[in-house]
Amino acid sequence: MDDDVLLDAARDCVLARGVRRTTLTDVARGAGVSRMTLYRRFPDVRSLLGALMTREFGALLARTNGSADGSHARARLVAGAVAGARAIVADPLMRSVLDRDGELVLPYVVQRLGSTQHIAEQFLLAQLLAGHEDGSVRAGDPAVQARALLLVVQSFVLSHGPATTDIDPAALFGELAHLLDASLRPEPT
């Protein structure tokens, strides 16, 4: 059994019912498999949903970061980070999770990083290292810079929606691009 069939069924359940109301029984039914088949691969809903989020948001970030063009690494980092944030904010799965079960995201904000956050951080780190090399990013510890940028971009993603309905989304993402670019630009000598 291909995991994608199981993950597709889990995605459908989350979109229809939300995270908390998704059960392994519903997912097995949606995938057309027995519960035992699903249990052999995913012992509980948490592991299934973790795999789903990693697949969905990892692929989304890969698509947006792969298309980030720019004359230098700082431009690629800014374009990729803003494109990734825009894509995640617009993603129906992320909207469903944040709108229905937002408190489930809290551990990934205050306790630990999840797989998708590590994927995003690796993109940021690679661009920071390239930016140090080409001189487009100010000097600093790249691991610290990557984490700081991740936390800033993450706040834009998680706060988008009710907290930003009175602000033009294009202007808000433009401000994110400005913040990222300005924070990374080398200081004039």
Image (cartoon, rainbow, N blue to C red):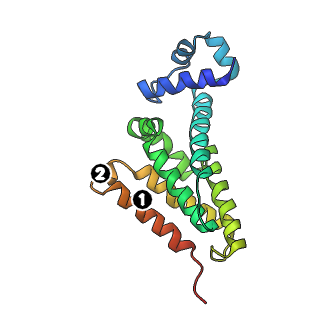
Is residue 61 left or right of 169 when viewed as pictured?
right
Foreground mark, 1 or 2, reads 1
Residue 178 rendering spot, x and y as whole percentages: 46, 68
Q: Which mark is residue 73?
A: none
Q: Which mark is residue 173?
A: 1
Q: Are marks 1 and 2 in contact (CB under 8 Å)?
A: no
Residue 1 rendering spot, x and y as whole percentages: 69, 17
Q: Check disc 1 and report its element: helix, strand or loop.
A: helix
Going from N to C along the chain, the mark reached first, 1 or 2, is: 2
**Front residue (pair 142, 109):** 142
* Disc 2 target residue: 165
For the C terminus, give its image quadrant: bottom right
How many dots with numbers?
2
Callout 2 crowding tier (Cα within 10 Å): few <14, some 14–19, many ≥20: few
The quarter holding residue 186 reads bottom right
Residue 105 rendering spot, x and y as whole percentages: 50, 43
Please determine whether, in this image, residue 189 is positioned above or below residue 17.
below
Residue 62 rendering spot, x and y as whole percentages: 62, 46
- The residue sitting at 70% across, 66% down in the picture is 130
**Front residue (pair 66, 119):** 66
